[in-house]
Amino acid sequence: MILTDRIAHGVAAGDVTVAYRRWMDTRGIKAGSTLRTVAGIVRIDRVDRVDLEQLEASAAGYNSRAELVSTLRGDETVPLWRITLRWIGPDPREELASNAILTAAEIDEISTVLKKLDARHHWAEPTLYRLAEQPGMTAAQLAEGLPIGKEPLKRRIRTLKEHGLTRSLPSGYRLSPRGHAYLDATDPKRQ
């Protein structure tokens, strides 16, 4: 389940407490699970089947029921679900990404991760350098000249983000302060 930036920030502010989706089943979404959003970690507290008459537009971040209904995908034969949401806190990857003071052990750990990521296809290190030189590059732009395509690269860039080395932009990616600190510490040309 993906929340738009506006809705995710609404959940973080406490203004949005529910989302509605049309799904045949809810196997992919369960009460107690969490979502990473642009506004931090959001917990799914409940998932209940509802009827159109039960929609709460303001709780979902909309001005009217009609506005909310216009965002629902799928036809009326697909069951409608209310997902009760609660903001848990900031994304821990953000704190990691902001840390630009690296210990020798952290530098070694990042180097080990990058070597593993580059074992089959050399993409991770070149991606970091390209983002250092040109922040905002998209996966399609980054994939040019790499031995992997855009979609596999997107998934792999998430691994870089898990280690605090990159950040996502509305369109494209940039190196995080931690990513810059790593390149500065390991590349004599950048020192």
Image (cartoon, rainbow, N blue to C red):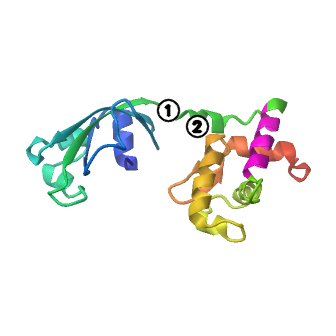
- SS class, disc 1: loop
User: Local crowd at mark 1 within 10 Å, few (<14), some, or many (≥20)?
Assistant: some
| In the image, residue 181 above or below residue 137 | above
Q: Which residues are magenta?
A: 106-117
Q: In which quadrant of the rendered view does residue 42 lie?
A: top left
Q: Marks 1 and 2: CB-CB under 8 Å?
A: yes
48 sits left or right of 112 in the view: left
Q: Residue furthest right?
A: 188
Residue 53 placement (x, y as % from top left): 8, 45
Q: Circle 1 is placed at which residue position? A: 90
| In the image, residue 34 above or below residue 142 | above
Q: Residue furthest bottom?
A: 144
Q: Nearer the viewer, residue 48 or 17?
A: 48
Residue at point 78%, 36% (across, down): 109
| In the image, residue 84 above or below residue 53 | above
Q: Circle 2 is placed at which residue position? A: 94
Residue 81 placement (x, y as % from top left): 22, 44
Q: Nearer the viewer, residue 162 or 179?
A: 162
181 sits left or right of 28 in the view: right
Label 1 and label 2: CA atoms lie apart by 8 Å
- SS class, disc 2: helix
57 sits left or right of 157 in the view: left
SS majority, magenta: helix
